[in-house]
Image (spheres, grey):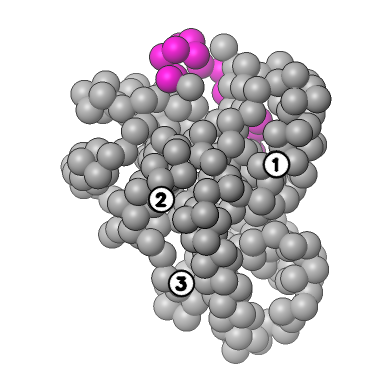
Amino acid sequence: MKVDMHIHTTASDGQYTPSEIAGKAAALKLEFFAITDHDTVAGIAEGRAAAQELRIRMIPGIEISTFDTEEIHMLGYQIDEKNKSLTAKCEEFAMEREGRGKRVCDYLNEIGIPVDWQEILEIAAGANISRPHFAAWLQQHGYVKERKDAFKKYLDTPEFHKATDRKLPTPYEAIALIHEAGGKAVLAHPGLLRMLPKEQKELICRCREHGLDGLECYYGRHSKEQTAYYLQIAKGLNLKVTAGSDFHGEKVKPDVVMGMEIDGNQTELGF
Ligand code: AMP
Ligand code: MN
Ligand code: MN
Ligand code: MN
């Protein structure tokens, strides 16, 4: 079965509009797909309408940035995107992102890179401001060849983080918010966590105690071994299993393709 439960659109840092994503999902003959933009539900209505027209199932989702001992991403599925608490929080997230974006501009200016806030707003074109928008600017202006080099050189260094960090909710707050909006909370890409395996397991257990519903065992960048490892953890903790590529479009993440072929069936995924 082929699905994709982790996709970004132009509502956050993805390359394609929600309608284009629905078109691609239909062309790939996915069983279903989810739109999971960073800290926003702005792409869902358009994605749903396009999906309905193409007769493909779309799961409304979100990917919330949180902080525990490192940045933890919490996916929410089957959320009511009109839920008041959720929309209010998304507005807060957008403001935090805007504030951080301005700090990123100041930081880059200080190290001699003449990036201008207005140009970033144009690149983002109404989306939540995120680092890939700065990476696009740095690439366009010849500071880096590939966008991933923008992170290595400028946007993911200790100095960058020190100068630009923003306030993030805890994973528990994100789980509660997702539940309040009627959704299921899933810990994203556990294989990308920087902490040790023992600490990962403790984190997943703690989140489970706070109501975590699932674990993204199948992930575009997980090895077979990692997938097997996380499937075992999910089974032990009675967590739902999800599968997502984290597709952003070729320009943003050239090595990530849309669609995940998985062994299980829909019932096993629990969606
Ligand atoms: P932000 O949420 O604004 O902190 O931006 C994080 C986003 O930047 C992630 O969702 C990825 O899409 C992207 N990103 C983070 N690290 C890298 C990297 N090393 N190479 C390419 N994209 C990255
Ligand atoms: Mn992203
Ligand atoms: Mn993520
Ligand atoms: Mn993502």
Q: Which residue is mark 3?
A: 166
Residues in magenta? 255-270
Tell me the number on the disc at residue 36. none
* Amino acid type at mark 3: Arg
Going by the numbered disc 2, the residue's amino acid type is Leu
Query: At numbered mark 2, what does the secondary structure look like: helix, strand or loop?
Result: helix
> Dot 2, crowdedness within 10 Å: few (<14), some or many (≥20)?
many
Question: Whole-percent x and y of residue 26?
Answer: 75, 22
Tell me if 119 is positioned left or right of 14 in this view: right
In the rendering, at what x and y percent does residue 46 appear? 75, 41
Q: Residue at x 45, y 27 (%)?
A: 242
Q: Is mark 2 within 8 Å of ligand 3?
A: no
Relative to the observer, which residue lies in front, 157 or 271?
A: 271
Decide: is 141 above or below 113: above
Q: Which mark lies nearer to you, 1 or 3? A: 1
Q: Position of residue 54 (x, y in %)?
A: 79, 22
Indicate which disc, 2 or 3, sits on the residue closer to the N terminus.
Answer: 3
The residue drawn where x is 41% and y is 14% is: 268
Residue under pointer 1: 45
